[in-house]
Structures are given as structure tokens and as C-alpha cells.
Image (spheres, grey):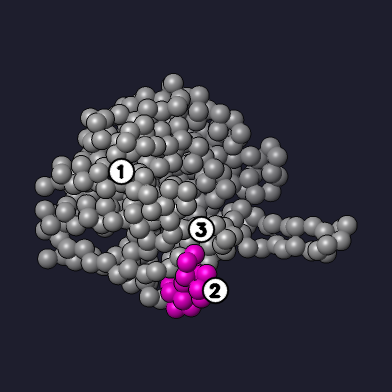
Amino acid sequence: MKRYRIAEIPGDGIGAEVLAPATAAVDRVARHHGFAVEYDEFDWSCERYAHTGAMMPEDGLDRIRHHDAILLGAVGWPGVPDHVSLWGLLIPIRREFHQYVNLRPITVLEGVPSPVTAARPGEVDFVVVRENNEGEYSADGGRYDRGTADERAVQESVFTRTGVERVLSYAFDLAERRGGRLTSATKSNGIVHTMPFWDELVAERAASHSGVAWDQEHIDALAAKVVLDPARFDVIVGSNLFGDILSDLAAAVAGGIGIAPSANLNPEREYPSMFEPVHGSAPDIAGKGLANPLGALWSASMMLDHLGEAEAGGQLLAAAREVLAEGTVRTGDLGGSASTDEFAAEVLRRLP
């Protein structure tokens, strides 16, 4: 029997609440399809930071380096600055393990009302491919002359040919397998060094993908078009910052951040990839049984796809989509009254 070893990091807030149904669903489809999943749980979190001064131990990355995948709940808690929790856990994992693709599917699901009139089920189905290791989220720069009239903050964006080319290759290859359309997010009319460089590399990569129709949009206009005409898009590729903003905006168009999954991928599979819902730790509802587990369930489905168990992953996602389409069991963020456990139980009931 094939066995997969997963590093499970519940994190903070609702993280543990949404991971529990996700792992239960994974275990169910795994048994049905004849493979096994083993979990090693790690308490890396803001709570750990409060007690030890570190989000994870010094050898944390080595502890999970040889796992098949990482399943993350959520990170963040009041009292711990966001840049501390992010740079103390998520960014080291993403960069050490070369998870340079952040993949976020955007689909308007049957039974999930979108706040956007033009966003209808069966018509809106695209993915945002975000460069995940460099760009605007660089550690280069600093604060200078603090407390003086000359105080200044400098944040350097770092775009390398290797970093941009590899994410563009992934995005164009993905577009070839999907609808054959790609949109590049840029701002080369205002950002005069990094964005023209990005645009040039997009054009170079497009030349070797003649089957993909592509265009580029300035990020401000693109944000408007994602809202006004979301059905026009197939694959959107953007830098770290642009992809981050666009994917959350698009998730809201699809009905809410609570349903959105994501994958931090090392496409070469030299290191484990990490899968996580987008919604964050939601301290205001933590411990109340109100969290929507769909983002975690969908992320777990993406993890199974990545592990080569696409049939099992598809079965898990299909069960969740069926519950939503029927509309009788849904969590409060989607206008229902079901608890986290009640929604999860309904999904599990539909799995073999």
C-alpha cells in the first residue's frame, strides 16, 4: 500500500478547526482508493511564539524537509505582529522549499452566491498563478535615520530572470492544459525597472507557447476587469504582490475568502509543497464552531492532486460541491446556520 507522510501545522485560531475535517475527508477517500496518509503534527504558531520567542524551532525546516506535503491551517493572532508570524513561518517554508508557485483556483460554485452580478456558476473558472519567492516581498532595504526629520524606509523589489522565467513557464504550461488563454499582470507604465523586465520575459516565454493566446493588463485596470467581467479569464499570472492582491479580490468575487484554497508548489517536487486555505486565523470566531471548512477541504483536494491521487482529490471536492449545490447545509458566511462540524459531516456522508 502506498503511504504518504504529511506535515500538519494547525497554526492559530480556526486553523485546527478546519484542518480536522480536511484530514478526516482525506483519510476517508484514501481508504477507498487504497492508499494511506500519516500525519506528523507540529505546534508552530503564534502561541508558540508567545512562549518561546519563535514561530518554529531552529531546525524546523529540517524536520519537515522529507515529508510528502505540508497541510497548514492558519497563522496569525492578536499581539503578534503579522510580519513576525509571516516571516517566522510561512515565508521560510515557501523559500527554503522553493515553493515558487502560489496557485489559487477561482470558481463560482453552484449554490454560492457571488456579490458580483456577472459572476455565475459554470462561467467563472480561472486560476491565479502568483510568483511566490521574490518580487516585492523581498527582505532587502531598511529603515534609516529613525526618529529624525530625514527618516526614510526603503523596500527593494527583487526580480531575477530565473525567478520570473520559472513561474511564467508554469503559468504558460497550465494555460496550454486549460483554456489556452493567459493574462499577465503588470504596471510597467509606472514601475520603470522591474515591470518592463517582467513584460519582456512574458513576451519571450509566449514565443515558445504558440498555442496560448495572451495579453497583459495594468494591475489597476485588471482589478476592475476581474470584478466587471470575471468570466473572460483563464490563467492570470502576476508578481508576488500583484498575485497576492488579485487572488483575494477574485476569491471575494467567487463568494468569499472563506471558501478559497491555495497551493504553494515546488513543481519539480524536490521539496514538499504546502497547501492552505486563504481565510486566515479569524480570531473573532475561533473556538465557536463557525468557521467554513471548505477552503481547507479544497486545499486538501489540491494536495491529493499534487501527490498523484487526482481521483481521490476530485472525489473529495465533488462531495463538497454537491453539499453547496443542494444549499440546505451551509455555514454562516454563506448565509446558512450550519456549524463547522455539521458542514464537514455532510461532506463526509457523501464520501464512500
Q: CA distance from mark 2 to mark 3?
A: 14 Å
248 to 264, vertically: above or below: above
Q: Secondary structure at mark 2?
A: loop
Q: Amino acid at mark 1?
A: Ser
Q: Amino acid at mark 2?
A: Gly
Q: What residue does disc 3 label?
A: 77
Q: Secondary structure at mark 1?
A: loop
Question: Is residue 290 in sight in this rendering?
Answer: yes
88 left or right of 138? left
Mark 3 is surrounded, within 10 Å at the Cα level, by few (under 14), some (14 to 19) or many (20 or more) other residues, namely some
Q: Secondary structure at mark 3?
A: loop
Q: Residue at x 55, y 39 (%)?
A: 185
Residue 178 position in % (x across, y down): 34, 37
Please provide the residue range marked out in magenta: 46-61
Q: Earlier in the sequence, mark 1 or mark 2?
A: 2
Residue 48 is covered by the magenta coloring? yes
90 left or right of 108? right
Q: Earlier in the sequence, mark 3 or mark 1?
A: 3
Mark 1 is surrounded, within 10 Å at the Cα level, by few (under 14), some (14 to 19) or many (20 or more) other residues, namely some
Q: CA distance from mark 1 to mark 2?
A: 34 Å
Residue 168 position in % (x across, y down): 47, 48
Q: What residue does disc 2 label?
A: 53
Q: Residue at x 48, y 78 (%)?
A: 58
Nearest to viewer (mark 3 / mark 1):
1
Q: Amino acid at mark 3?
A: Trp
Q: Of 115 and 126, which appears nearest the observer?
A: 115
How many dots with numbers? 3
Q: Of 25 and 168, which appears nearest the observer?
A: 25
Q: What residue does disc 1 label?
A: 339
Question: Is residue 210 in sight in this rendering?
Answer: no
Do the numbered discs 1 and 2 sit on residues whose CB atoms are within 8 Å?
Answer: no
